[in-house]
Image (spheres, rainbow, N blue to C red):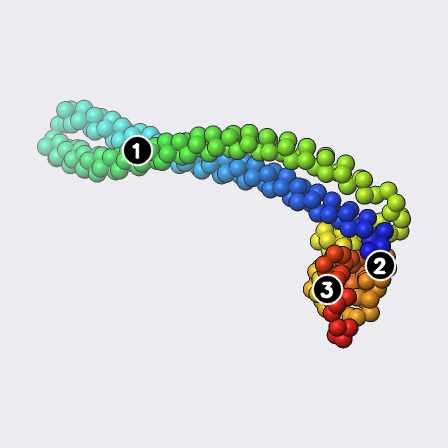
Amino acid sequence: MGLQTARLKGLNEADAHLLALREKERCLQEDVRQGERGVSEAERQCADIAAQLQQAQAAVGAHDLEVKALEERIYRLKSQRLACQTNKEYQTLSSEIASIGTDIRRMDDQGLALLGAVDQVEARAKEAAARLAAVRAEQAAAQARASAGQDAVRSEISAAETARATHLPGLDAEVLDRYERLLRSRGGTAVAAAIDRVCQGCFTKLSPQVVSLLLSDRDLVTCPSCSRILFVEGAAADAHRQAPSAT
């Protein structure tokens, strides 16, 4: 293969390695963000249940105040009944006292239901708090693992960037610019092997003319389909030379 193609091949291998390392770093960062989202969701659930508990407790408090008001009403009515002058007045007050007593007994049942609801929400609140504690602990451990992993990956990236720089000397500026455009538009693969007369970048069969150019060691031969820079070497080159020229 031509000198420029050989340099670009090495550069693309270095870029592929860098791309893999950066994807690994991104995955580590995403794991941390996912853990943070899990903590946020657990916190939101705890806050929702806390609000529900507050509402349930407020309902119990309002109920108790209502019952207390009725009991005070009965107390006043009984005091009034002691001062009744006629049987009719006595019976009227007694009837009202009995009616309020019925209301209080009914409300006692409601109060038990409200207390039961508070107990249920309190149990859910404890479960949510336990889940939140567990999620936070797991997130802290995941964060520690990710930090260690990120430090290692960043060290690898730094070394890979240094290694990449060794492939740049000798490359024409125009060729490098062309390569960079291909790298961006072709998913990180700007240089592709030709094997069995097929471009390994887009898997399009190559014409005999393109194969002939490759075997002549001409520089910067490109795939007519995907525009990637092609190379052929070693056993693959021998196979191309031995294959029939017909398509």
- Quadrant of residue 198 in the image? bottom right
Element type at mark 1: helix
Residue with the mark numbered 1: 119
Residue 1 in view: yes
The tag earlier along the polypeptide, 3 or 2, is: 2
Residue 178 in view: no
The tag earlier along the polypeptide, 1 or 3, is: 1
The nearer-to-camera label among 1 and 2 is 2
Of 49 and 141, the residue lying toward us: 141
Q: In this view, does 161 lie to the left or right of 109?
A: right
The tag earlier along the polypeptide, 1 or 2, is: 1
- Quadrant of residue 27 in the image? top right
- Residue 109, how many percent across, how many down? 22, 37
- Residue 245, how many percent across, how many down? 77, 73
Q: In this view, does 89 lie to the left or right of 150?
A: left
The amino acid pointed to by label 2 is Asp
Element type at mark 2: loop
Q: Is residue 138 above or below residue 16?
A: above
Residue lying at 51% horizontally and 30% vertically, measured from the top left: 141
Residue with the mark numbered 3: 239
Q: Which of the image's four quarters has the N terminus? A: bottom right
The amino acid pointed to by label 3 is Ala
Residue with the mark numbered 2: 217
Of 41 and 214, the residue lying toward us: 214
Of 241 and 156, the residue lying toward us: 241
